[in-house]
Image (cartoon, rainbow, N blue to C red):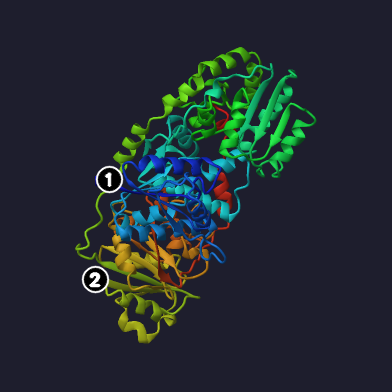
Amino acid sequence: MPERPRLVLATQEVWPLVLGGGIARHLAEVAGLLGAMADVTVLAPEGLREEYERLRAAGDERLPGDLRFVWFDEPGGDLSPMLSSHHAASLAVWRALRELAAEAPIDLVEFPDYRGIGAVAIDAKRSGCPELAATTLVVRLHTSWEMTAAADGQPREDLASRSVMALERLSLRFADRLLAPGEGTLGIYRRFYGAHRLAPATLVPVALVLGPENQRAREPREDGELRILYVGRMQRLKGVIGLVQGLRALPDPDVRLTMVGGDTATSPTGGSMRSHLEHLAGDDPRIVLRGSASRDEVAALMRSHDIVVVPSRFESYGYVVREALAANRPVLATPVGGMTDGFQVGRSGWLTTDGSDAAIAQGLADLVTRREEIAALIREGAPRATVEAMADDDLLRERYAALVKPASGAPAASSAEPPPVTAIVTVRRGDGSLAATLDALEAQRWPDLEIMVVADDPERVPVAQLARIGRLAYLPDGARVDARCLGLAQRRRDGHVLFLAAGETLAPGFLARCCLALAAPARPAYATAYGDGRDPVNAPLGNAVAALIGEFDAAASVALLPADALDGGLPDAPDGCEERVLYDRLAASGRYGTVVPDVLVRGRRTRCPDPRAAGRALAAVAIDEELWTAG
């Protein structure tokens, strides 16, 4: 490991440029802690640059002086051919990383799982990208968008939503490592996605920077009221409905609940949750709903209340729990995800029996009987002592240092002898120019390339092109065999196979780049690349997530495959969509392709859109309600 490793933290939000959210806080605090052992760069969206420059000009002490910020372009306008703005952002992150790697090698890049901004870079490494060959790519488990949407009961049928789920799943499956804050969080991810669909995981603490203790925080309130504070978004995932209902069910007039946080559109009807909570609260004067507050305001609010309640259905880490303990206020929390890590029942506060609304209501009722215990914990400083025991900066740095090494071997040797390639070009009704495709193949200047053409009609092969074709085959009249199947059956040798159709062309470096991909340590089942058209088939994500976006991911109409991927030939596909069946079959056997994120294909065609994709996606993400309530 070099004396000063080079680390990049890629994010869409970082504190204090963005004031709310666990991801923003984690990025700021982990960057500060890792700065003692590494050169740290924060890669953030261009839209945050103006706020950064303003704070820097003002000498804002919250900005670490030795931390470098670099900006990636934010997608806007026409995003074609990307599947969504998040897909375009992931590509922009990869391009910015490639520029940083050109300056000097990068030892480790950390991405958040939320919205999958690391997906393109992770697949670029799988495709043998030399810039990242010795870089460890890790994904931190914060709570994926898919998990959040499932817990909030939000729709996930539209293409943009399904593309975000696909990006997240790619990141979680193919990262070199997942970073989990604790076993509780990792267990939920394994139950949600399936352990076999996740990359290896390492337990790495979340950065926890505690300010000095405020001695006034050891002074419990004496007016006889029980003041309860909730801090967080007004969101279904956060358990706010059960919280308001539970408070309303209490008969005690001297209990107060203050709720602080921004609104979300996660009510049971899909509208404003704040409005829904106001309706549930009715005219109960014990419940007060406020807007968002700064961290300083939150700390003051915590000192003016007796206990903080965190009723979330899932938290990967639970910053509010730690903030409350740091302010020396006990916590009532649900026993889910990372909430229980380091939590000492009876000193940190109390846990409900599970994450259900009934358990939250019972937990609130129990608090009414614990007023003296709450006051005693505050006087003793027990909550603050328990959070101080959780902070372990040395362990965090040790775990990161262990990750700073090549995670999957060295890149393929560039001096390796180029493998033989058979290009099977199909010529069918509606295809484009065969001459253009042959021109593109010859421009590859590949030393061992056989060109085989399979046509459904002899008239589709111009006589002028015959001399350029190594082998020629025609489909017999009425034959049910597919053109590619016939080509495979009649090829004369082993080696890689290139599939493409007449009219599809390749940039001159396509074969060299895709052969490098097949030789990469990941050993992908096939390699393809981006295309130059506006249709989303030109920005494929591959067969690992094709069930989510199948109507656009018949991407391998142009693909290079190793011979062993075709053992047994092409599967039977009576509907004429043999390519989709092939890549589905490879995925079912645990073999996944990779996509080179450079435009190396021109004129890509898709023959088999899959209108069933959305239905398959919904079936794949059906979530048992028990997942969010079990302790």
Query: For this rendering, which residue is in front, 245 or 257?
Result: 257
Position of residue 20 measured from the top left corner of the image (x, y, whole percent): 56, 43
Q: x, y percentage for residue 38?
A: 32, 45
* Residue named by callout 1: 405
Q: Which image quarter is the N terminus in?
A: top left
Asked if residue 205 shows in the view, the reply is yes
**538 versus 306 height, above or below:** below
Residue 472: quarter of image? bottom left
597 over 10 or under it: above or below: below
Q: What residue is shown at x 51% (from left), y 65% (from top)? A: 81
> Mark 2 against mark 1, which lies toward the viewer?
1
Label 2 element class: loop
How many labels, in total? 2
Q: Left or right of 254: which side holds 310? A: left
Q: CA distance from mark 2 to mark 1?
A: 36 Å
Q: Is residue 32 left or right of residue 234?
A: left
| Label 1 Cα neighbours within 10 Å, binned few <14 / some 14-19 / many ≥20 | some
Horizontal side, residue 307 vs residue 274: left or right? left
Task: Depth check: give the residue in front, 16 or 106.
Answer: 16
Q: Check if mark 2's residue and mark 1's residue have beta carbons within 8 Å.
A: no
Question: Closer to the camera, 572 or 627?
Answer: 627
Q: Amino acid at mark 1?
A: Lys
Closer to the chain start, of discs 2 and 1, is 1
Above or below: residue 322 compared with residue 492: above
Residue 517 visible in the shown view: no
Instruction: Give the number of the disc on residue 448.
Output: 2
Q: Secondary structure at mark 1?
A: loop
Q: Amino acid at mark 2?
A: Asp
Residue at image point 47% right, 70% down: 478
Which residue in the rendered view is the most extreme toward the right?
Answer: 283
